[in-house]
Amino acid sequence: MQSRTSASRTGRPRSAEADAAILVATRAALVELGWSGLTLGNVATRAGVAKTTLYRRWAGKNELVVDAVAALFDELELPDRGTLAADIEGVVLQFAAILARPEAQSGLMAVLAESTRDAALRERIRTSVVDRQKRLVLEGRARAQVRGELPPETDPSTAARTVDLIFDMVAGAVVHRTLVSAEPVDQPWVQSFTRVLLLGLAGAAAPS
Amino acid sequence: MQSRTSASRTGRPRSAEADAAILVATRAALVELGWSGLTLGNVATRAGVAKTTLYRRWAGKNELVVDAVAALFDELELPDRGTLAADIEGVVLQFAAILARPEAQSGLMAVLAESTRDAALRERIRTSVVDRQKRLVLEGRARAQVRGELPPETDPSTAARTVDLIFDMVAGAVVHRTLVSAEPVDQPWVQSFTRVLLLGLAGAAAPS
Amino acid sequence: MQSRTSASRTGRPRSAEADAAILVATRAALVELGWSGLTLGNVATRAGVAKTTLYRRWAGKNELVVDAVAALFDELELPDRGTLAADIEGVVLQFAAILARPEAQSGLMAVLAESTRDAALRERIRTSVVDRQKRLVLEGRARAQVRGELPPETDPSTAARTVDLIFDMVAGAVVHRTLVSAEPVDQPWVQSFTRVLLLGLAGAAAPS
Amino acid sequence: MQSRTSASRTGRPRSAEADAAILVATRAALVELGWSGLTLGNVATRAGVAKTTLYRRWAGKNELVVDAVAALFDELELPDRGTLAADIEGVVLQFAAILARPEAQSGLMAVLAESTRDAALRERIRTSVVDRQKRLVLEGRARAQVRGELPPETDPSTAARTVDLIFDMVAGAVVHRTLVSAEPVDQPWVQSFTRVLLLGLAGAAAPS
DNA sequence: TTATAACCGAGACGGTACGTCAGGTCTTTTT
DNA sequence: AAAAAGACCTGACGTACCGTCTCGGTTATAA
């Protein structure tokens, strides 16, 4: 999240309550006001905290919102549903449920927009949000390999490229349907999508 | 874009040059300053136009940027490359080329973020940007049906759902790879992606 | 008021109605909005006239308001009330009645404020407003001399200085009471004032 | 001048230097630009202060100018010159000297014009400017009564009306000569004026 | 137990951009 | 050629937030 350069032994320690209150207030403000309407002064007031306290911990609006939104993705899990298809459907629905929240929608997209011009922000998003999602793809593949649904990978670099492709296809499709098409990611859509994806991957793995 | 309620016969007409200069200036400002750095005052100065002239035509930053970015998608075309796979690869590369431009990246994402809280803006984006892309999917399918690569659709509602699915998968994957993964959409990736997509669609069309 | 350089024989003649309508509208706007709230656009709309028509006749807000307010002073008259004291009381009451009007108060003072930095405006005010008042002092003195209440003047320059002094004392006291003290110029006040003034002048004319 | 509703103990205190710098800058701007040319942005720049700092202390141009000009009248004094006539001549010359300053001329008149439509502003002018002048009239009368030049007042309400009359006559005549007639208030004029005034008052006090 | 150090709230500070408005000018069609 | 209409440029308006700073005060560890 944020840290002081070195652990100072002396002085009053930072309030842990303040941190939590600020993140809660940030999400509430995102829901009510959206990204553009969110101001740090407003967040500070909601959190019952001075503006300086906020700036002591985060560099600005972008960083704060990344942390506030990243927490939403902590709940992403991959319970074993027995088959690869069921696992994928499960995680897609979870992901869609998070994306459907207003604080995620406006916050995440706006922060991505800013990240196109800010490498540090992009890195922060990657570690806080993206990698947390990608890990599920890796877990799912490993589990499917144990089950025998997928062959063990031979070439590591090919395998990495395939994971990236799957990740972009899954996350991209869900994000696009939610935010651009503004259509619900419901059970029928998820089944159709999963079917196309798995059949495509299976076909591509076979000799052309 | 924008229009007066009724064609007023009298009075000085609006300058067409101003319109063009403003959109050009907006794209230039997006490239140099990004979404958050872009100010309407700066755009007006670049365009050699008064701020009021700008506000007379657009309601605000969002609307202006939508129009400025939408023009980029006018160049999307679907030349006949002989096969469905080649057509898809061609349009994906075109789409990726547009998305790779800095003015499209920061502008488009930010405007999408705002659109999550503004229905009118969402509609404007749909008509100006999204539908222009979706049209290519429809054209591509029709052409493939003529070639015999795809069967003619039987149920119209199923067909529409399939088109939507394809659109979200194609556009979503490209957008996600470009903006979130920040990896290039190059020839190898496009070929892998197209192969998975087409095999998946073919398999899904066949009886399960 | 205003004039074209030469009587142009050709072209559409200026509307005389427009002139009157503009001045009426200006006074109405002064009453409703005051000096600072008065805008030329508003005046033009009230008068049913285009803004250009207005600028063709007056150079700006100051000049327009001077003309609009000057018309109020046309009604100043000096009917013969039989004695010098009665004449003075009459004209003071008339003057106070005009000053009590809201269009005169805010308009006149503001224009005077501007005139401190604009010689042309000061001259315009003198000819349009001030001289019209001063004339009454001259008439009153002449009438009093005919009646024998005042001796005929001997030294013209002394006489001129005396007229100026009287004028500043009369107009100044009325203006100050109305606008600064914000107290009414009523019958008792006028009588007290006139008594002090006339006794003072009589005493000063006598050898000290 | 201005004050927060209650003395807040916490928070950064307001800069006293800023206050002084703003008032100095306001007077300088009045001299250079006049009332209509004065803008709060310009004042802020001159004072080396942000525009918001200015608005935090004053509600607008009118209030600021009143305070800036009021300070000029702090120097009004009534040194004992031995006789009532000399005292009057002294204070009139002082008052005229202040009025002759360009910052007083344009600022004061314009603010008076605005005050005709703004009771709060009128009250502010009264306490800041007018009462400071009127006090001199009271002091002068008291001193003359001690000297025996004037009888002690019998009826308080008559006395008050007389003070008001004197005040309007003195201040009105000086203001009118300075701003309307645009003639200098020099020694000869002041002597003539004082002579008329005192003789008039003496005559009026005697039985008619 | 007393420094000392970092924290905390409050709120003023110098700035930047906002979106609006008025002042004047210019361009078009109509009279 | 004047008129009505309305777009145009300029520049000020008053507001909102920004991110920084200066206060008076509050916890902590360290001497």
Image (cartoon, coloured by chain):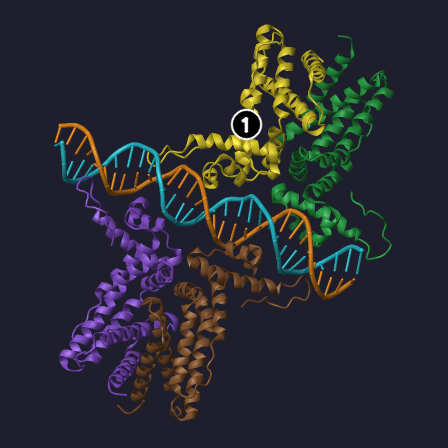
Chain colours: A purple, B brown, C green, D yellow, E orange, F cyan
Q: In percent of the image, x 65 and y 46: which residue is there? A: C29
The residue at which mark 1 appears reads as D70
Q: Is residue D30 above or below residue D141?
A: below
Name the residue nearer the viewer: B192 or A44: B192
Q: Is residue B47 above or below residue A198?
A: above
Q: Chain of mark 1?
A: D
Q: In percent of the image, x 31 and y 47: which residue is there? A: A55
User: Which amino acid type is marked by label 1?
Assistant: Ala
Name the residue nearer the viewer: D127 or B32: B32
Question: Dividing the picture into quarters, in which one does residue A89 lie?
Answer: bottom left
Q: Position of residue C68 (x, y in %)?
A: 72, 42
Q: Position of residue F23 (x, y in %)?
A: 32, 33
Q: Position of residue A124 (x, y in %)?
A: 28, 59
Q: In the image, is A49 to the left or to the right of F8?
A: left
Question: Could one spot residue D2 in this view of the protein?
Answer: no
Question: Could one spot residue B192 in this view of the protein?
Answer: yes
Looking at the rendered structure, the secondary structure element under dot 1 is helix
Q: Position of residue B98 (x, y in %)?
A: 43, 71
Name the residue nearer the viewer: D17 or D119: D17
Question: Dividing the picture into quarters, in which one does residue A122 lie?
Answer: bottom left
Count of numbered marks: 1
Q: Quadrant of the C terminus of chain D?
A: top right
Mark 1 residue crowding within 10 angstroms, few (<14) / some (14–19) / many (20+): many
Q: In percent of the image, x 81 and y 19: which residue is there? A: C157
Q: Is residue D23 above or below residue D41?
A: above
